[in-house]
Image: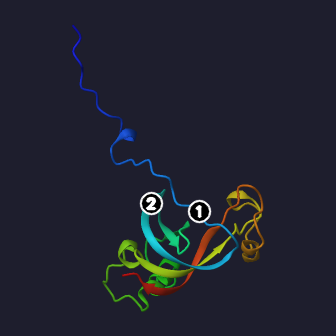
Amino acid sequence: MNRPRLVTRPKAASPEFAFIAPKPALSGEPGERIAECVAIETKRRGNKCQVWFTFETEDGETGRMWVEVPERLTPTCRYMRLVRLALGREPRQGEPIHPANVFEDRRFRIVVGWRKSHGARGKGGFDEALAQNGPKDQSDFLRIHDLAELVDPCP
């Protein structure tokens, strides 16, 4: 007689994985919108660190933006410029500025546009004007290019 064996679940079938339909991606025209930062993810890419921000607009659409964080933060790097924008002031020396503490649950005026390069994956050079000109091909989509200002912290 065969006995049932205990079989471990593969990691992909773990209970943390949820089958929930995603919110719609950014649509419409390029420009500025109001959006709340709803999630932060940090990723290691080789010897670099990236912060991925997920924003949800007032229309319920979602978009993402990523920022490369240098090994040594400088006052002029893009990440520190965004931190100053989110805090509304200069961060104090020694103050923790982890992205989840600084950006999450705050509303910003975001800049949305198409790909800034002629070709996919940055091929063909970059031009700021291309972000407003419409999709270059079928793989182009609206994305968040920058944060313009802090609107107000969400309750």
Could you tell me if residue 97 is visible in this image? yes
Q: Residue 67's x, y, as percent? A: 52, 70
Q: Quadrant of the N terminus?
A: top left
Residue labelled with disc 2 = 43
Identified by mark 2, the residue type is: Lys
Identified by mark 1, the residue type is: Ala
| In this rendering, the label closer to the viewer, 2 or 1 | 1
Q: Going 44% across and 77% down the picture, which residue do you hit? A: 73
Residue extending furthest bottom?
89
Q: Residue 143's x, y, as percent? A: 62, 67
Label 2 vs 1, first from the N-terminus: 1
Dot 2 surroundings within 10 Å: few (below 14), some, or many (20 or more)?
few
Image quadrant assignment for residue 123 = bottom right
Q: CA distance from mark 2 to mark 1?
A: 22 Å
Q: Which mark is residue 25?
A: 1
Image quadrant assignment for residue 61 = bottom right
Q: Going 44% across and 69% down the picture, which residue do you hit? A: 38
Q: Residue 114's x, y, as percent? A: 70, 68
Residue 96 or 13: which is nearer the viewer? Answer: 13
Query: For the residue labelled by badge 1, is the local secondary structure a helix, a strand or a loop?
Result: loop
Side of 22 where 142 appears, left or right: right
Q: Is residue 36 above or below residue 121?
A: below
Q: Residue 92's x, y, as percent? A: 34, 89
Residue 80 or 136: which is nearer the viewer? Answer: 136
Side of 146 where 14 appears, left or right: left
